[in-house]
Amino acid sequence: MQIKRAYTLLEFMVVLLICLVLLCVMVPCTISVKAIMHSRSCTIDMRQLSAAMSMYIAAMSMYINDYDGVYPSPYGGTFVSSDDSIDKSYGGETWSAMLDSYTKSSPGTLLHCAAADLNQISEQMSDKRLCGYAYNAELADKRILSAQGDKKQDVMFGHDDSHVAFPTLTVVLSDARLGVISINKPDIKIKGRVRGISVAELQSSIQEQPAGATRHQGGANYAFADGHVHWFKPEQLSVDPKCDGKTPGFGL
């Protein structure tokens, strides 16, 4: 009769060690593949948004019967200026809602970066058109409508496209935290004044979210005025309000 030999403790430990090594190799690979897929999905969304932006500008050009088309306002309602890092909006229609009819997808289905976690936002905020992308604040100006005590109520107007001297270098859309509507630099957590608009009710959530500018493997996707999309680290982009004709960034 043949007696089956049992595994020794050493053999068992060797097998266990091999399994652990394989697990350590496979888990990061799985995470990396998921991150790459999120980044590619984000790139596709931004390309469609860029195309929608071009269609919007062309439509506005026909509407105003002028040579130059007009960029959409980042925010269609009024908002209150603040001494904090970014102005607070109350109600109104955002740039993403204005582009809905120009996108190929059903309204509201396209505008969401897969890497931006909507679970961080309460259900009551679902109508705020939170997409994880921000509009370049340099593409619009704000004008004072009226004064309310010591605060000023403003409205935004988009520039016409003749303001953009270097379409291949000027950012139109960028990855950003949920609730950030427009911004004039990469969405990193910085102190000091930032030109832009965010949803007033989401201020605490915005501060808690990971920075949009490092969302995709240490960088972010940026859509440019000519329609192309490119990945950059935040330090690779210029934040000067005037483009130098050489460096990609937010300046016009």
Image (cartoon, helix red, strand yellow):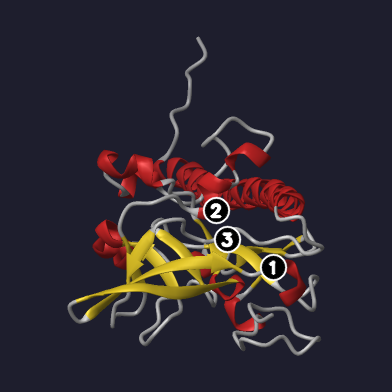
Label 1 or label 2, whichever comes before in sequence order: 2
Q: Can I make out residue 223 in this image? A: yes
Q: Where residue 64 appears, x then y in whole percent? A: 70, 55
Label pair 1/2, CB-CB below 8 angstroms: no
Q: Which residue is mark 3?
A: 216
**Residue at position x 33%, y 52% in the image:** 91
Q: Separation of disc 2 and disc 3 at Cα?
A: 15 Å
**Residue at position x 29%, y 78% in the image:** 82
Q: Residues within 10 Å of mark 2 (few under 14, many from 20)?
A: few
Q: Separation of disc 1 and disc 2 at Cα?
A: 46 Å
Is 144 drawn above or below residue 181 in the view shown?
below
Question: What amino acid is found at the position of numbered circle 3 in the picture?
Answer: His
Is 83 drawn above or below residue 126 in the view shown?
below
Q: Residues within 10 Å of mark 1 (few under 14, many from 20)?
A: some
Q: Which residue is mark 2?
A: 28
| Left or right: 240, with 68 as reference point | left
Label 3 or label 1, whichever comes before in sequence order: 1
Question: What amino acid is found at the position of numbered circle 2 in the picture?
Answer: Pro
**Front position in the image: 164 or 40:** 164
Label pair 3/1, CB-CB below 8 angstroms: no
Q: Residues within 10 Å of mark 3 (few under 14, many from 20)?
A: many
Q: Separation of disc 3 and disc 1 at Cα?
A: 31 Å
Question: What amino acid is found at the position of numbered circle 1 in the picture?
Answer: Asp
**Front position in the image: 225 or 237:** 225
Instruction: Give the SS element for disc 2.
Output: helix
Instruction: Give the SS element for disc 3.
Output: loop
| Left or right: 164, with 34 as reference point | right
Q: Which residue is mark 1?
A: 160
**Residue at position x 34%, y 79% in the image:** 85
